[in-house]
Amino acid sequence: MKNVVHVKNINIGEGKPKVCVPIMGATKKEISEELDLLQTIKVDLVEWRGDLFQEIENEISVKYMLQKINQEIPHLPLLFTFRTKGEGGGREVTLEKYKEINRFVIESKLVDLVDVELFRGKNLVKELVSFAHLHDQKVIISNHDFNQTPPRDEIISRLKLAADNGADIGKIAVMPRNDEDVLNLLSATSLVKELNHIPIVTMSMGADGLISRLSGEVFGSAITFASGKTASAPGQIEAKKLQTVLTIIHDSINKKK
């Protein structure tokens, strides 16, 4: 039976791909404006991109923002992500600082999921996964390649490695250079889905890879990212438009059953 990750009121890994919208503000004011917008659109979960927050190394400010996000959208699962510069994020930090920030957020118990980068180092990844699980939080182990799409077998290998390192959900995002790259990403997604280990999240970025953000229920990607006020990666479309397309695909699949 396929694994499903239950977080608050959603089951990640069954039915339509869950729509996640990132909070991308650099300041408290910008984040507040994004939270206002989130009250007006239908989403399934929210990601806070902590790497873009100017005060991310100030624990008092981080805790304040986490509390505010929870107060404004208490019904939505919250994913915390510190995306490093090497994987398309807003800043680079030492491994020690990366660990310190993530441990503080986990220990606050104000998030439901945390993103850990696959190639932050095997020991650090396993330490953060264990720490998150100790605090009853789920972990997405992720990998992002903004330069290329690795071969299909390498995509599969990285998703398997995420599972081997204790991920509740495995994620990979890649940049296509041609149509074949997009097909390889979709093919890898379908093959990993059949292994039935953990839910996976995959995407081919940019306009060329748009189909991968729409067809998760067909190929096996459990979450798709949509833009709120600002997109967090190339190719994201507005949440409202995305929900419409996902519903059309979902209804079509169910008619076949």
Image (tube, grey):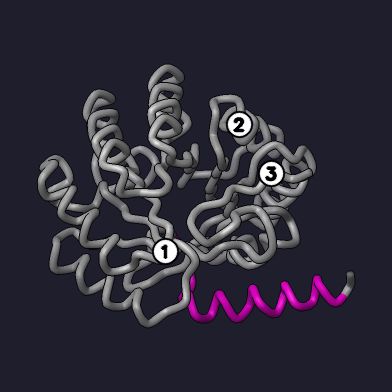
Check residue 212 for magenta coloring.
Answer: no
The 10 Å Cα crowd at callout 2, few under 14, some 14 to 19, many 20 or more, is many
**Between 86 and 191, which is closer to the camera in this rendering?**
191
User: Mark 3 or 2, which is nearer the eye?
Assistant: 3
x and y percentages locating residue 48 in the rendered image: 32, 55
Which residue position holds label 3?
3
x and y percentages locating residue 18 in the rendered image: 56, 62
Seen at 35% across and 64% down, the residue is 74
x and y percentages locating residue 54 in the rendered image: 14, 51
The 10 Å Cα crowd at callout 3, few under 14, some 14 to 19, many 20 or more, is some
> Judging from the image, what secondary structure is the residue with disc 1 in?
loop
Seen at 47% across and 41% down, the residue is 138
Residue farthest to the top, as pictured? 123
Q: Amino acid at mark 2?
A: Ala
Which residue position holds label 1?
76
User: Mark 2 or 1, which is nearer the eye?
Assistant: 1
Which residue position holds label 2?
163
Looking at the image, tell me whether mark 3 or mark 1 is earlier in sequence order: 3
CA distance for labels 3 and 2: 12 Å
Magenta region, residue range: 234-255
The 10 Å Cα crowd at callout 1, few under 14, some 14 to 19, many 20 or more, is some
Query: Based on the displayed image, in which of its 4 quarters is residue 39 positioned?
Result: bottom left
> Judging from the image, what secondary structure is the residue with disc 3 in?
loop
Query: Based on the displayed image, in which of its 4 quarters is residue 11 positioned?
Result: bottom right
x and y percentages locating residue 178 in the rendered image: 64, 55
